[in-house]
Image (cartoon, rainbow, N blue to C red):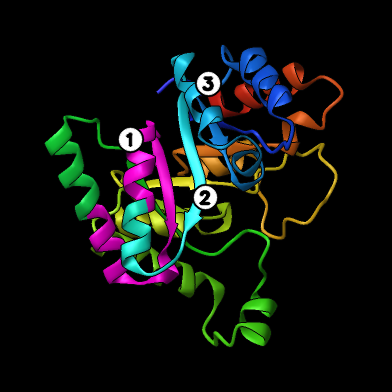
Amino acid sequence: MPAKEKIILALDVSDVKYAIEIIDKFKDYVGIFKVGLEVFTAAGPAVVEEINRRDKKVFLDLKFHDISNTVIKAALNAVRLGAYMFNLHASGGLEMMRSCKEAVVDLCLRENIRKPKLLGVTVLTGLSQEVLKDELGIQHSLRTHVKQLSKLSAEAGLDGVVASGHEVAALRNHFGKNFLIVTPGIRTSWSPPDDQKRTMTPRQAIREGADYIVLGRAVMNQPDPFKALELITAEILTA
């Protein structure tokens, strides 16, 4: 896979026109654009359609988490919208994930639609071991919790998971090469610290076994985003 195909650029903006400007500016430098809650609540499905119109891939990062019936209906909308991949919270449980996956496969077969990649969200990169234990009441280690949620995702038939770089090596070792791992919380060595707790550089994440890395502020907050992408691409190639 070419280096640029491993890069997912986050459209973390609220201005629709600016989102489209970003798409047009960077479409030749990245493989996938991430449509998250911020831009989706501002632009709706139109932003996905704009990306597809340019023959680029969409990671619909809406983290579905609800009762099975609601998640299934949302997932089928995501399929018809043309998302290349989308995610749902693994903490929603095995039944929710499995029924969602089965409904997606059924729709794709009936309507001859390319099946998108389905990912289970494990533990958000903004959460720490302390929050997991003291606020959420989960007593085992963060790494154990990520592994358990990944196990549920695999049992449900999902294509892979979203997990921080700190858990990638253990997941890759346990689930093998065909289990997709998308890694957010990517920060370059020259980026300032922010609200992400479990971060990793592009080179480290790829070396650990990540299939895709999600970049947002690490690129967009740089004085020269194109130079930042060039350096990140070089890191991927040398990982």
Magenta-drawn stretch contains 81: yes
Residue 161 spot, x, y in % from top left: 41, 53
**Amino acid, disc 1:** Arg
- Upstream in sequence: badge 2 or badge 1: 2
- Upstream in sequence: badge 2 or badge 3: 3
Q: Residues within 10 Å of mark 2 (few under 14, many from 20)?
A: some
Q: Quadrant of residue 138?
A: bottom right
Q: For the N terminus, give its image quadrant.
A: top left
**Which disc is residue 168 wearing?**
none
Residue 2 shows up from this direction: yes
In the rendered structure, which segment of residues is drawn in magenta? Answer: 74-101
Q: Secondary structure at mark 1?
A: helix
Magenta-drawn stretch contains 91: yes
Residue 29 spot, x, y in % from top left: 59, 16
Q: Secondary structure at mark 3?
A: helix
| Residue hosting label 2 | 62
**Amino acid, disc 2:** Leu
**Which disc is residue 50 wearing?**
3
Q: Quadrant of residue 85?
A: top left
- Residue at 52% x, 46% y: name it: 61
C-alpha distance separating marks 2 and 3 = 17 Å
Q: Say whether residue 78 is left or right of residue 219.
A: left
Q: Quadrant of residue 125?
A: bottom right
Residue 163 spot, x, y in % from top left: 51, 55
* Front residue of this view, candidates 104 and 234: 104
| Residue hosting label 1 | 80
C-alpha distance separating marks 3 and 1 = 15 Å
